[in-house]
Image (cartoon, helix red, strand yellow):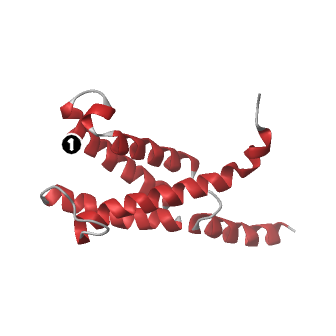
Amino acid sequence: MQITSIQRWAPHLLSALRIVAAGSFFTHGTMKLVSWPAPFEYPMNALLYVAGLMEVIGGFLLIVGFLSRTTAFLLSGLMAFAYFIAHGSQGFFPVLNHGEAALLYCFLFLYIAAAGPGPWSIDAQVAKSQQEPMRAASL
């Protein structure tokens, strides 16, 4: 049985998924950089500071939906790197090596890079405003 009535919400749910995931991702960076909403539990090093900056800046860009595809692609790579550096060496299964979040963020951001940010984004508004003059010119 197919639930076709929910398909019309797919673009908006993509935007909601992007916003919620980016908001959660943003807090991973704020934990590293400013100890909010809680202090980061591991000692900081240069790689973690870079990751924290990418999480804060990239998370914010994805929350508002600006430069979404590029940002999501870069963050997907960051999470792939994090998975293999911090988690993959501790065993194969993500549930055992505590890498589930990194793995899920990696593929979620890769999907956003491919699918786009959805209609609730600055990118969508910019694209819409660029199409309006072209429509007027073709009339």
Identified at 30% across, 28% down, the residue is: 93
Q: Position of residue 86 (x, y in %)?
A: 21, 42
For the residue pair 92 and 107, the one nearer the viewer reads as 92
Identified at 53% across, 64% down, the residue is: 65
- Determine which quarter of the picture holds residue 53: bottom left
Q: Position of residue 21 (x, y in %)?
A: 47, 55
Q: Is 8 drawn above or below residue 52 in the view shown?
A: above
Identified at 44% across, 53% down, the residue is: 72
- Determine which quarter of the picture holds residue 136: bottom right
Residue topped by disc 1: 86
Q: Position of residue 35 (x, y in %)?
A: 24, 69
- The reply, left or right, for residue 114 in relation to residue 92 is right
Please state the total of marks drawn on the protein image: 1
- The reply, left or right, for residue 91 in relation to residue 68 is left
For the residue pair 83 and 112, the one nearer the viewer reads as 83
Give the quarter of the figure containing the N terminus. top right
Identified at 37% across, 52% down, the residue is: 74
For the residue pair 38 and 10, the one nearer the viewer reads as 38
Q: Can residue 66 be seen at all in this image of the molecule?
A: no
- The reply, left or right, for residue 106 in relation to residue 86 is right
Q: Can residue 96 be seen at all in this image of the molecule?
A: yes
Give the quarter of the figure containing the C terminus. bottom right
